[in-house]
């Protein structure tokens, strides 16, 4: 019998379109829901992208937003090459969150990004989201809402998290925080369905008796 043929290995690539094709070919071999294959996936991706620049890897990661298991490998290499790249830190933190990596690595990356670029609102959102203690999470969202006064999502998170703590701990101070946040959201609402949803939340909160 002849010598066993070895599987072809993708050669390193740097040109963007070729890089994307190489990554796509690898991604198609792995199910995004199979956690056990992530180490093998990472190895295959790094073999194919070893010669790619950090800029090309970042662009490729953006292309694979719907595959965080792929994007996270590319972004890890970007951050390794460019540890002060705030955008890459935020994207990596977000992908860790999507993959269920837990709050600790997300908080660490978000904090690094904030230190590099305090104006990056997404970094602040991930920093607040990654706080494990519900009461402290309310405080973090309050900081974000104060820093970015027009950020309705941050304000909604203040309201929702405060309401959750109030219900769990029978805390009237948290009820007041939630009501104040919802009232601000009510004043900003542009559509009837938004106002109706806020009104329902306010009616519920104002009726709570512990």
Image (cartoon, helix red, strand yellow):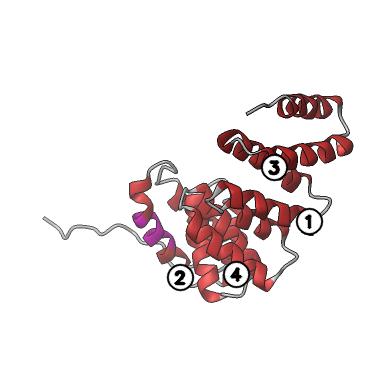
129 in relation to 208, above or below: below
Quadrant of the image for the N terminus?
Answer: bottom left
Give the CA separation, mark 3 to mark 4: 32 Å
**What label sits on residue 195 in the rendered view?**
none
Residue to which mark 4 is pinned:
112
Mark number displayed over residue 146: 1
**Placement of 134 over or under 164, stated as above or below:** below
How crowded pointer 1 is (Cα within 10 Å; few <14, some 14-19, many 20+) is rated as few
Q: Are marks 3 and 4 in contact (CB under 8 Å)?
A: no
Query: Closer to the camera, 55 or 102?
Result: 102
Instruction: State which quarter of the image contains the C terminus.
Output: top right
State how many labels appear.
4
Of marks 3 and 2, the one in the foreground: 3
Mark whose residue sits in front, 1 or 2: 1
Number of the label disc, if any, that sits on residue 173: 3
Left/right of residue 170 with respect to residue 141 in the rendered view: left
- CA gap between label 3 and label 2 equals 54 Å
Which region shows up in magenta? 39-45
Q: Quadrant of residue 41?
A: bottom left
- According to the image, label 2 marks what residue? 50
User: x%, y% of residue 64?
Assistant: 57, 51
Q: Residue at x 83, y 53 (%)?
A: 149
Residue at point 33% right, 48% down?
A: 36
Q: Is tag 3's residue or tag 1's residue first in the polypeptide sequence?
A: 1
Residue 194 in sight? yes
Q: Position of residue 38 (x, y in %)?
A: 38, 52
Tag in front: 2 or 4: 4
Q: Report if the CB atoms under discs 4 and 1 are less than 8 Å apart.
A: no
Q: Tell me the SS state at disc 1.
A: helix
Q: Secondary structure at mark 3?
A: helix
Earlier in the chain: of badge 4 and badge 1, it is 4
Mark 3, other Cα within 10 Å: few <14 / some 14–19 / many ≥20: few
């Amino acid at each position: 019998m002849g010598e066993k043929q070895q599987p072809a290995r993708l050669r390193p690539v740097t040109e963007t379109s070729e890089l994307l094709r190489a990554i796509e070919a690898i991604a198609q071999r792995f199910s995004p829901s199979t956690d056990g294959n992530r180490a093998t996936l990472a190895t295959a991706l790094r073999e194919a992208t070893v010669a790619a620049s950090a800029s090309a890897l970042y662009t490729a990661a953006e292309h694979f937003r719907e595959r965080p298991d792929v994007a996270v490998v590319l972004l890890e290499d970007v951050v390794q090459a460019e540890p002060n790249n705030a955008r890459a830190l935020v994207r990596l933190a977000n992908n860790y969150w999507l993959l269920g990596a837990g709050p600790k690595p997300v908080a660490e990356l978000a904090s690094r990004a904030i230190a590099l670029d305090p104006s990056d609102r997404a970094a602040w959102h991930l920093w607040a989201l990654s706080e494990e203690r519900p009461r402290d999470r309310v405080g973090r969202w309050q900081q974000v809402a104060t820093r970015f006064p027009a950020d309705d999502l941050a304000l909604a998170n203040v309201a929702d998290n405060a309401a959750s703590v109030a219900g769990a701990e029978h805390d009237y101070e948290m009820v007041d925080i939630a009501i104040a946040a919802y009232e601000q959201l009510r004043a900003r609402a542009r559509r009837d369905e938004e106002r109706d949803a806020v009104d329902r939340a306010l009616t519920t909160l104002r009726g709570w008796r512990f």
